[in-house]
């Protein structure tokens, strides 16, 4: 549940190569079929600076990032995900089914964060990001999504699978390009994605082994594309670094990423459903 991660200072900027997405990549295209999340009115991101933030999405999930200091010159963070309820200006946060803390909105730029287990009870000055229900991209994307299918183009070959399984991807890459791949395992065991928490300013990819990878400072407000500035674990998952775009069609969310994998370009399309 709690993972130490490193902050990648600069996200990669790569041109989009997915011709199959061009027709669907207009702002709001296909998004009318996506329902509005029950908690959309409380879907906000509160940022306190230096990497500390709590981002709430429209179906009752949250992503919290907390800096833990420098190690070997690298900024390290802790990622915590869970669920929440909201009433009377108070977000009640739960982790693993147990109440973890509260965030109380004091005014437009101040919150009070109370987490008894960590002996935290303090007011914080924050900036607030709020998605608009009138913006179809923000409204439709703000959910917790389940992976349906992955298509990857790598070194002119295509790899496809149900769901998202990085171990299966590694096996395929070794079979096709083994002579160019490092001997040590690229990914830890059980790197099968279980869900993707999509908020107004963050995406959190959750894996079966408990690993959580956060893409930070994203925005789909204007549609088309955005740059992923990834909060990553120490053994970085390079396939998630790069420029990304979101499109919707028939109740599905399509996340396209131009990335690198083993220092080679990779084009990725992940299909998600609710």
Image (cartoon, helix red, strand yellow):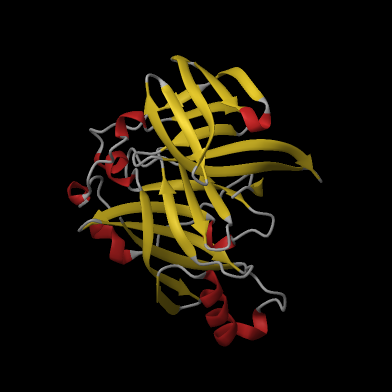
Q: Quadrant of the C terminus?
A: bottom left
Q: Tell me residue 94's x, y (percent).
A: 49, 38
Among all residues in the image, which is located at the extreme front? 98
Q: Position of residue 76 (x, y in %)?
A: 70, 43
Q: From what the image shows, is residue 169 above or below residue 2?
A: below
**Up-down: is 222 above or below 2?**
above
In this rendering, the count of numbered labels is: 0
Residue shown at 48% from the left, 16% from the top: 109
Q: Nearer the viewer, residue 26 or 134?
A: 134
Q: Is residue 67 left or right of residue 221?
A: right
Q: Quadrant of residue 269?
A: bottom left
Q: Which residue is farthest top?
A: 107
| Residue 185 against residue 52 in the figure, above or below | below
Report whether 120 appears left or right of 74: left
Residue 29 shows in this picture: no
The one nearer the camera, 85 or 231, is 85
Residue drawn at x 25%, y 49% as measured from the top left: 26
Residue 3 in view in this figure: yes
At 57% from the left edge and 43% from the top edge, which residue is drawn?
A: 80
Front residue of 245/183: it is 183
Q: Residue at 44% across / 28% down in the picture?
A: 91
**Image spot of residue 154 (x, y percent):** 49, 74
Q: Residue furthest right?
A: 72
x and y, in percent, of residue 32 in the image: 18, 47
Query: For residue 27, what is the image quadrant?
Result: top left
Q: Is residue 160 above or below residue 19?
A: below
Q: Could you say which is closer to the camera, residue 10 or residue 87?
A: 87
């Amino acid at each position: 549940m709690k993972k130490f991660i490193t902050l990648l200072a600069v996200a990669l900027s790569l041109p989009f190569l997915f011709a199959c997405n061009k027709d669907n990549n207009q702002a709001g295209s296909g998004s009318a079929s996506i329902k509005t999340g029950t908690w959309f009115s409380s879907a906000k991101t509160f940022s306190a600076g230096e990497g500390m933030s709590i981002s709430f999405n429209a179906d009752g999930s949250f992503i919290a990032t907390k800096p833990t200091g420098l190690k070997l010159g690298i900024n390290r963070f802790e990622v915590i995900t869970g669920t929440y309820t909201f009433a009377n200006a108070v977000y009640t946060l739960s982790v693993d089914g147990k109440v973890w803390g509260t965030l109380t909105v004091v005014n437009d730029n101040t919150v009070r964060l109370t987490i008894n287990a960590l002996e935290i009870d303090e007011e914080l000055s924050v900036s607030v990001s709020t998605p608009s229900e009138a913006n179809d991209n923000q409204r439709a994307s703000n959910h917790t999504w389940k992976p349906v299918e992955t298509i990857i183009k790598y070194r002119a070959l295509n790899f496809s699978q149900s769901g998202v399984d990085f171990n299966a991807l590694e096996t395929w890459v070794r079979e096709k390009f083994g002579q160019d791949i490092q001997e040590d395992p690229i990914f830890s065991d059980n790197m099968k994605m279980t869900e993707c928490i999509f908020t107004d300013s963050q995406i959190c990819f959750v894996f079966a082994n408990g690993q959580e990878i956060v893409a930070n400072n994203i925005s789909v407000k204007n549609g088309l594309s955005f740059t992923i500035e990834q909060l990553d674990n120490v053994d970085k998952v390079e396939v998630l670094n790069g420029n990304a775009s979101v499109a919707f069609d028939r109740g599905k969310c399509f996340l396209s990423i131009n990335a690198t994998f083993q220092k080679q370009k990779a084009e990725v399309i992940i299909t998600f459903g609710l």
